[in-house]
């Protein structure tokens, strides 16, 4: 039996999503997909004092380079929708830089590759 003074670590840190987002929902123009890449802007540290703890945690996490929205949600242990709202606020404030993920590579024609290989072998033996 768990002592009443002891809570499980996850239960002790639980904050309801509507508290984190101030009761807001995803914006109509949801610009963040699960694979959108996000990083902190160069001057984000100078203006962090006015931000909520969750927004500061997102910026600290993104300060090391680009992360996808899904990775940020996983590291923060928050629902993706909540993370998207936080990211939207931070992007609107100029704290974040976003970019689309690298496009999917197209398949190369196998015949073309074989011709290049044959040409190289003929030339260099």
Image (cartoon, helix red, strand yellow):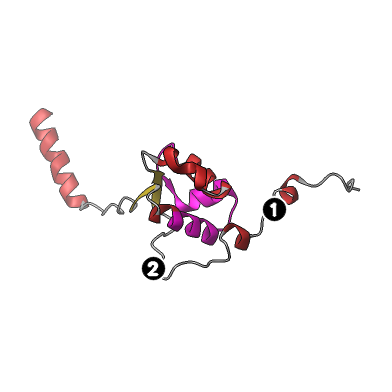
Q: Which residue sits at x=10%, y=38%?
A: 119
Seen from the viewer's position, the closer of residues 62 and 100 is: 62
Question: Is 39 a magenta residue?
Answer: no
Q: Which mark is residue 29?
A: 2
Q: Which residue sits at x=48%, y=58%?
A: 84
Residue that lies at the very extreme toward the bottom in this rendered image: 28
Magenta region, residue range = 63-89
Element type at marker 2? loop
Q: Which mark is residue 14?
A: 1
Residue that lies at the very extreme toward the top in this rendered image: 124
Q: Which residue sits at x=74%, y=48%?
A: 12
Element type at marker 1? loop
Seen from the viewer's position, the closer of residues 124 and 93 is: 93
Spot occupied by residue 87 in the image (x, y as percentages of width and height): 45, 54
Q: Pick whichever of labels 2 and 1 is earlier in the sequence.
A: 1
Residue that lies at the very extreme toward the front in this rendered image: 50
Spot occupied by residue 89 in the image (x, y as percentages of width and height): 45, 56
Q: Which mark is residue 49?
A: none
- Magenta residues: mostly which secondary structure? helix
Tell me if 65 is positioned left or right of 104 in this view.
right
Spot occupied by residue 75 in the image (x, y as percentages of width and height): 55, 46
Q: Which residue sits at x=10%, y=34%?
A: 122
Residue that lies at the very extreme toward the left in this rendered image: 123
- Measure the C-alpha gap from mark 2 to mark 1: 29 Å
């Amino acid at each position: 039996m768990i002592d009443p003074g002891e809570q499980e670590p996850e239960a002790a840190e639980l904050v309801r999503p509507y508290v984190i987002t101030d009761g807001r929902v995803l914006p109509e123009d949801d610009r963040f997909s699960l694979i959108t890449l996000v990083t902190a802007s160069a001057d984000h540290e100078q203006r962090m004092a006015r931000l909520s703890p969750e927004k500061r945690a997102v910026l600290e996490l993104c300060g090391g380079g680009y992360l996808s929205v899904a990775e940020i949600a996983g590291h923060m242990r928050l629902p993706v929708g909540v993370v998207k709202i936080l990211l939207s606020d931070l992007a609107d404030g100029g704290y974040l830089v976003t970019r689309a993920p690298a496009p999917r590579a197209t398949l190369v024609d196998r015949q073309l590759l074989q011709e290049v290989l044959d040409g190289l072998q003929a030339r260099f033996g």
